[in-house]
Image (cartoon, grey):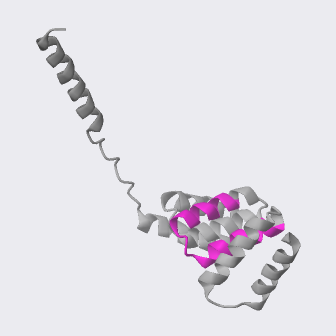
Amino acid sequence: MTPETARAVLLAGCLALLAGCASQPKPEPVVVNTAEASELARQAWEAHQQGRKKEALERYREAFDMNPGNALTANNLALLLREQGRFDEAVTVLETGLRHSPATAELHYNLAVISELYLLDLDGALAHYRRYRELAGTEEKRVAGWIADLERRLN
């Protein structure tokens, strides 16, 4: 190989290496319209209070899809799904809510209840009851009793 060819190969290799190291374009940030999501959640709550559960579910779903970080919307949507026997969907909503708001005690509580009573996931229920107790900062006797019962059943 001639020196010129070697230099060309080396230069091509360096360019390929640099191209691979170049930063990728940053993804466009997701813009959350919290005002619109909050309004949809308010409409959902109102519809639910008036017994219009189908409309409430649609509005909560829209609000949640727009802003999955709103723990109250996630919780209310999950509770409505639970009422309809849609437990797996409720769990998915609660888990998504927890990814965005891991320190929301109510999300852990409702995930524990669904896990224990409807899905028979006792290990998951125990973990979420314990986390609920930590976050809530209170020693509720009924939750402490449920934790003791689950520990006894699992051991």
Q: Where is residue 75, by image quadrant? A: bottom right
Quadrant containing the C terminus is: bottom right
In the image: residue 72, left or right of residue 16: right
Quadrant containing the N terminus is: top left
Q: What is the tally of numbered marks visible in this picture?
A: 0
Q: Is residue 47 magenta?
A: no
Looking at this rendering, what residue extends furthest in the right direction?
Answer: 153
Of residue 72 and residue 121, the one placed in the foreground of this image is 121
Of residue 78 and residue 43, the one placed in the foreground of this image is 78
User: 62 above or below 127?
Assistant: above
User: 20 above or below 141?
Assistant: above
Q: Residue 13: image x %, image y %?
A: 24, 24
In the image: residue 14, left or right of residue 79: left
Q: Where is residue 89, by image quadrant? A: bottom right
Per the rendered image, the range of residues in magenta is 90-117
Q: Residue 58: image x %, image y %?
A: 61, 58
Q: Residue 135: image x %, image y %?
A: 60, 82
